[in-house]
């Protein structure tokens, strides 16, 4: 079984002082060895609050680099440390979720015979 973390960073706006705001969503991508497996078999999701066993109990550090062609924005590099809010991890609810949830392996659709229609981007750019 394999569990990885998927990071999704989305723009959230601009502060009055010009700083950019981002939202970061972390989610587990779970891959069972067979066709399916109970969620409780993924060690990374067990025991919320236990730093040795659970990915959500760690502080994450990541860098963000923002570049723009606009001369007023320029180029900036900023770093942030993100800490999971462990107070929101309810061990009772977490235990019930782990016990009754099945993780099924993803079987992608065969799209080899599907036709793809594409159009020159220049036509769209004129709008």
Image (cartoon, rainbow, N blue to C red):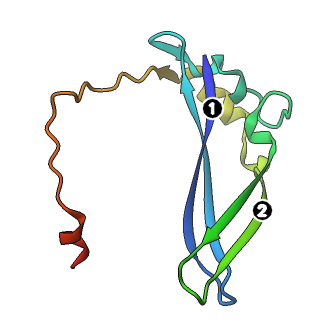
Quarter of the image with the N terminus is: top right
Q: Earlier in the sequence, mark 1 or mark 2?
A: 1
Circle 1 residues within 10 Å: few <14, some 14–19, many ≥20: few
Q: What residue is rendered at 28% in x and 26% in y? A: 109
| Residue 62 drawn above or below residue 34 | below
Q: Secondary structure at mark 1?
A: strand
| Residue 68 drawn above or below residue 34 | below
Residue 89 percent across, percent down from the top left: 72, 43
Q: How far is disc 1 from disc 2 in space, using C-alphas?
A: 21 Å
Q: Given the current orientation, which residue lies at the most extreme top position? A: 34
Q: Nearer the viewer, residue 51 or 61?
A: 61
| Residue 60 drawn above or below residue 30 | below
Residue 13 percent across, percent down from the top left: 56, 77
| Residue 47 drawn above or below residue 56 | above
Q: Quarter-wise, where is residue 6 in the image?
A: top right
How many labels, in total? Answer: 2
Residue 73 percent across, percent down from the top left: 61, 84
Q: Quarter-wise, where is residue 54 in the image?
A: top right
Judged left or right of residue 120, residue 93 is right
Circle 2 residues within 10 Å: few <14, some 14–19, many ≥20: few
Q: What residue is rendered at 53% in x and 79% in y? A: 69
Q: What residue is rendered at 64% in x and 20% in y? A: 40
Q: What residue is rendered at 84% in x and 32% in y? A: 50
Q: Nearer the viewer, residue 5 or 104?
A: 5
Q: Which mark is residue 80?
A: 2
Quarter of the image with the C terminus is: bottom left
Judged left or right of residue 13, residue 75 is right
Residue 16 percent across, percent down from the top left: 65, 90
Q: Nearer the viewer, residue 50 or 92?
A: 50
Judged left or right of residue 58, residue 92 is left
Q: Which mark is residue 4?
A: 1
């Amino acid at each position: 079984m394999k569990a990885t973390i998927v990071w999704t960073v989305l723009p959230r706006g601009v502060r009055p002082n010009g700083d950019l705001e981002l939202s970061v969503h972390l989610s587990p991508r779970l891959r069972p060895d067979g066709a399916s497996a109970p969620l409780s078999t993924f060690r990374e999701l067990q025991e919320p609050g236990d730093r040795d066993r659970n990915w959500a109990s760690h502080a994450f550090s990541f860098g963000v680099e923002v570049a723009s062609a606009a001369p007023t924005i320029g180029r900036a590099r900023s770093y942030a440390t993100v800490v999971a809010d462990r107070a929101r991890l309810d061990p009772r609810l977490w235990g019930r979720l782990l016990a009754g949830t099945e993780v099924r392996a993803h079987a992608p659709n065969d799209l080899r015979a599907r036709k793809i229609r594409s159009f020159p981007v220049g036509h769209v750019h004129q709008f």
